[in-house]
Image: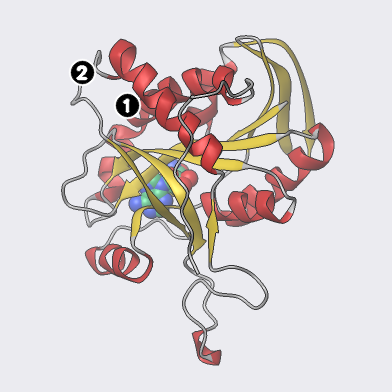
């Protein structure tokens, strides 16, 4: 069983439409769907926006559906000037950037007894990059906007829609982050504490700058299409046995 979570309706409905044998149940006002996605058993849920919602949804999914691996899919704001809407970010690490115990001499994102940056599962990251390549030739280049780039790096999460250049620069410099959103780190921390491999896949909807709100609204649909096309390849590949010689994911180590 693979656990799949998105925050908003737009982020889960394309995957939901491809599921068969679906049973639904509601827990903590959150709907969970269990079924088959192109031969792979999955649990799918829409968490709602923000770290609290993401945490609750992730822990319930782990407890009730006992997934072996977890993937979060959705949209994000890109933090580098050369990024474009639709580009795909596969998180190597996630960080909860608004955890602030700097008053005690700690670094932003650091809390006692917890890692500051949490590493995503290298194997799932490798499968996600392979899924990007598989989707690229068939669907990602075949729509009405620029062919997307794939980038691997840190995703910084906080309970705030970022729409200012000062914050986006700070996130880039403080965490070497590529993108910001509002759920990935909460999801990742929860998976990590439960000992589950996880990945966070994001398509860029905006550039987290002063025009981000309008850009987000204009591009949400297009960006969700891109993350969906990647998920459509990743879900069936995510649980398969690894063949010898198959690409392994990158290994990152952060002290
Ligand atoms: N439409 C909502 C608000 C969306 S919040 C409303 O009606 O209030 C933005 C969502 O997209 C979050 O789930 C977040 O994870 C992601 N996101 C995209 N761009 C972002 C940005 N610039 N800053 C923070 N989160 C962003």
Image quarter of the N terminus: top right
Task: Please state the total of marks drawn on the protein image.
Answer: 2
The residue sitting at the bottom extreme is: 104
Asked if ligand 1 lies within 8 A of label 2, the reply is no
Q: In the rendered image, is residue 183 in sight?
A: no
Residue at image point 18% right, 26% down: 146
Please say if 200 is above or below 25. below
Q: Is residue 173 left or right of residue 38?
A: left
The residue where tag 1 is placed is 222
**Residue 145's disc number:** none
Q: How is the image coloured?
A: secondary structure
Q: Quadrant of residue 227?
A: top left
Indicate the secondary structure of the residue bearing disc 1: helix
* Image coords of residue 127 (percent x, y): 49, 29
Q: Can residue 208 be seen by looking at this rendering?
A: yes
Q: In the drawing, does residue 15 fall left or right of residue 30?
A: left
- How packed is label 1: few (under 14 Cα within 10 Å), some, or many (20 or more)? some
Rendered residue at 49%/18% (across/down): 232
Disc 2 crowd, CA 10 A, few/some/many (<14, 14-19, 20+) = few
In the rendered view, would you say 80 is above or below 214?
below
Callouts 2 and 1 close, C-beta under 8 Å: yes
Q: Earlier in the sequence, mark 2 or mark 1?
A: 2
Residue most toward the right? 64
Q: Is residue 148 left or right of residue 43?
A: left
Q: How far from the left and from the top, in percent, is residue 255? A: 50, 69
Q: Is residue 167 above or below residue 153?
A: below
In terms of depth relative to the viewer, which is nearer, 206 or 242? 242
């Amino acid at each position: 069983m693979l656990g799949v979570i998105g925050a908003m309706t737009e982020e889960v409905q394309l995957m939901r439409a491809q599921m068969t044998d679906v049973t639904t149940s509601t827990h903590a006002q959150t709907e969970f769907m269990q079924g088959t996605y192109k031969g792979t058993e999955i649990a799918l849920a829409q968490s709602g926006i923000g770290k609290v919602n993401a945490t609750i949804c992730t822990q319930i999914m782990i407890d009730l559906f006992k997934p072996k691996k977890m993937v979060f899919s959705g949209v994000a704001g890109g933090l580098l000037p050369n990024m474009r809407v639709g580009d795909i970010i596969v998180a190597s690490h996630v960080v909860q950037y608004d955890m602030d115990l700097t008053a005690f001499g700690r670094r932003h994102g650091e809390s006692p007894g917890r890692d500051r940056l949490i590493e995503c599962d290298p194997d799932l990251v490798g499968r996600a990059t392979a899924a990007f390549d598989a989707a690229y030739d068939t669907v990602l280049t075949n729509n009405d906007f620029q062919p997307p780039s794939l980038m691997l790096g840190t995703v910084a999460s906080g309970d705030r829609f970022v729409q200012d250049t000062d914050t986006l620069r700070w996130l880039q410099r403080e965490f070497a982050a590529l993108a910001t959103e509002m759920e990935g780190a909460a999801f990742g921390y929860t998976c990590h504490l439960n000992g589950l491999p996880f990945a966070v896949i994001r398509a860029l909807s905006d550039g987290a700058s002063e025009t981000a709100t309008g850009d987000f609204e204009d591009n949400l649909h297009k960006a969700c299409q891109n993350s969906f096309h990647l998920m459509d390849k990743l879900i069936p590949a995510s649980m398969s046995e690894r063949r010898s010689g198959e690409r392994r994911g990158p290994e990152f180590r952060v002290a």
